[in-house]
Amino acid sequence: MPTFVSCPDCGAAAQITERFRLPSTDGPVEHIALHCTAGHHFRMPADRLPAAADRRPPPADRRPARQPMPQPAQRPTPAGLPC
């Protein structure tokens, strides 16, 4: 069953695609690989994830809605006609 979390970079939905252990001087450390809907890829220690890894698919998009760009004010041309 896939595990879904928030992307550490952008907060979008991310799926854990791999779990593995790497040796360390304090013993093996569990690591994960994840891929988010925005295209980010991470390999990181599992303890860096948020405390609650949700096992249900997340909402389609957790990213904030994009705000429209403000339109520049139009200046009249020297002849007084719009651009």
Image: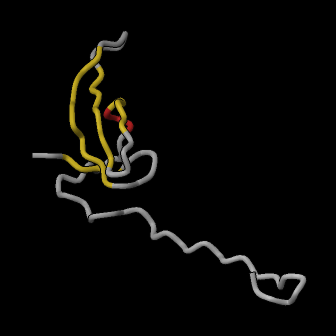
Q: Nearer the viewer, residue 57 or 51?
A: 57
Q: Quadrant of the C terminus?
A: bottom right
Picture coordinates of residue 13, whole percent (x, y): 31, 54
Picture coordinates of residue 27, whole percent (x, y): 29, 14
Q: Nearer the viewer, residue 22 or 12?
A: 12
Looking at the image, how many numbered discs can be counted on the residues?
Answer: 0
On screen, residue 74 versus residue 57, left or right, reads: right
Q: Residue at x 30, y 48 (%)?
A: 14
Report which quarter residue 68 is drawn in.
bottom right
Q: Residue at x 29, y 28 (%)?
A: 31
Q: Is residue 58 above or below residue 42?
A: below
On screen, residue 72 versus residue 51, left or right, reads: right
Q: Residue at x 28, y 32 (%)?
A: 32
Picture coordinates of residue 34, whole percent (x, y): 29, 39
On screen, residue 24 versus residue 73, left or right, reads: left
What scheme was used to colour the molecule? secondary structure
Report which quarter residue 41 is drawn in.
top left
Q: Is residue 43 above or below residue 83?
A: above
Q: Residue at x 80, y 88 (%)?
A: 81
